[in-house]
Amino acid sequence: MKAAFTQAAESEDRPAAQLLRDFMRAYVERQKRKAFEGEARRQSLAVAKRARNPESDDANEGAGCTHQ
C-alpha cells in the first residue's frame, strides 16, 4: 500500500509526506466539526426540552413581550 501511495503521490508531483499531512489535517478538522455539531445538537435538544416545560424561564421568555 505504501508503494502504491508513493507512486500515486509522485504521479501528481506531490511529496507523499505532504499528502499525509493534508490527510491528517482534514481528518482532524472533520473530528472537530463532528464534535462541534454533536455539542450544538445536545444544547439544542436541552433548550427545546426546557422550552416544553411550562415552568421553565425559557418557555416564558416571550410572554409579555411586546413588539414595537
Image (cartoon, rainbow, N blue to C red):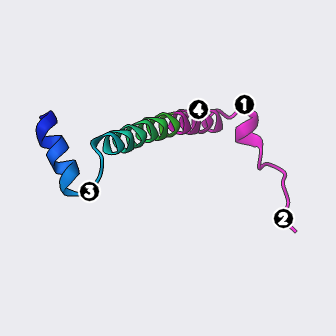
User: Quarter-wise, where is residue 16 in the image?
Assistant: top left
In the image, what residue type sits under mark 3? Answer: Asp
Q: Which residues are magenta?
A: 39-68
Q: Disc 1 on helix, strand or loop?
A: loop
Q: Nearer the viewer, residue 20 or 11?
A: 11
Q: Residues within 10 Å of mark 3 (few under 14, many from 20)?
A: few
In the image, what residue type sits under mark 1? Answer: Glu
In the image, what residue type sits under mark 4? Answer: Ala
- Location of mark 4 (residue): 46
Question: Which residue appears at 30% of the width and 46% of the height?
Answer: 15
Question: Which label's residue is closer to the chain start, 3 or 1?
Answer: 3
- Location of mark 3 (residue): 13
Report the quarter where the C terminus lies. Answer: bottom right
Q: CA distance from mark 4 to mark 3?
A: 50 Å
The mark lying in front, picked from 2 and 4, is 4
Q: CA distance from mark 3 to mark 2?
A: 62 Å
Question: Which label's residue is closer to the chain start, 1 or 4?
Answer: 4
Q: CA distance from mark 2 to mark 4?
A: 27 Å
- Location of mark 1 (residue): 55
Name the spot of residue 3 as percent of width and height, x first: 12, 37
The mark lying in front, picked from 1 and 4, is 4
- Location of mark 2 (residue): 67
Q: Disc 3 on helix, strand or loop?
A: loop
